[in-house]
Image: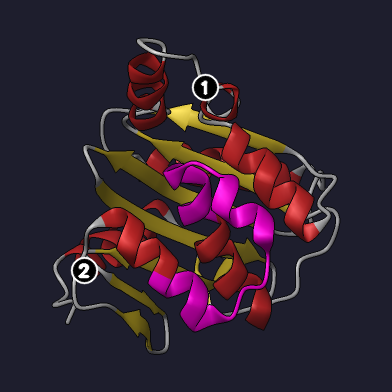
Amino acid sequence: MPNQFYIQDWIKIKNGAIFNSEESVFAFSEDELNPFLKAAYDNLKLEYPKFHKMDGLSKLGILASEIIFRKNKATKDTALVFSNNASSLETDRQFQDSTKTFASPSLFVYTLPNIVLGEISIKFKLQSENAFFISENFNAELLQSYTESLLLSEKAPEVLCGWLDLQNGEYDVFLCLVSKEKNIPFSEENLKKIYCAENEKPTH
């Protein structure tokens, strides 16, 4: 059967660098999370004050989505299908630490991994299907099958899917936009190829 769906664009954020299918978008001299996030926000001229109140996972999701959607405008029906290994563990630990003095309500809000889906939906005015899966490693088969089921059932005209992981200050983000518009054939094999190849790519 001929391929029905295609990867329109993808974005990778890792080791102080952001790059997509065409170019290096941003590179920072250090890859420590908070300085990198602030520098990337300034570089993109994001002008979204709520960003500064978010946890690290949501900030990474907003940055990646912003770059994808600047070139490929989202519709209210653009679906989100994300996965990672660590859930919201990074923020969970921060919240647990805060309870030793005063439990932080602003951290507690982010102690679920799917909160990032809500933040992206708010910023880009999405009213769409979304899902967040936890898996041990990047699971191309899961992402491909769930994304394709949404597209085949016409629950969404396009899907932003991928891996959004943050643990112990180390971040690994790979998102791609999938639709019927012809480009890179959307398959488990191609997801693996892009993810693995870009993980091996020099970042500075």
Judged from the image, the secondary structure of the residue bearing numbered disc 2 is helix
Quadrant of the rendered image containing residue 51: bottom right
Instruction: State the residue at coordinates (49%, 14%).
Output: 103
Residue 173: quarter of image:
bottom left
Distance CA(mark 1)–CA(mark 2): 39 Å
Residue at 76 percent of width and 66 percent of height: 74
Q: Is residue 5 at least partly visible in the picture?
A: no
> What residue does disc 1 label?
104
Q: Quadrant of the N terminus?
A: bottom right
Asked whether residue 183 is drawn in magenta, I would say: no
For badge 2, the amino acid type reads Ala
Q: Residues within 10 Å of mark 1 (few under 14, many from 20)?
A: some
Which one is in front in this view, the residue at disc 1 or the one at disc 2? 1
**Secondary structure mostly seen in the magenta stretch:** helix
- In which quadrant of the rendered image does the C terminus lie? bottom left
Q: Which residue is mark 2?
A: 197
Residue type of the residue flagged with mark 1: Ser
Residue found at the very far top of the displayed protein: 100
Does residue 196 lie above or below 17 as drawn?
Answer: above
Q: Tags 1 and 2 in contact by the CB under 8 Å rule?
A: no
Q: Position of residue 37 (x, y in %)?
A: 40, 62
Q: Earlier in the sequence, mark 1 or mark 2?
A: 1
Tell me the residue at 33%/22% (across/down).
93
Towards the viewer: 85 or 204 = 204
Task: Determine whether the residue tagged by mark 1 lies in a helix, strand or loop.
Answer: loop
Q: Is residue 151 above or below residue 23?
A: above
Q: Which residues make up the magenta segment?
A: 39-61
Q: Quadrant of residue 101?
A: top left
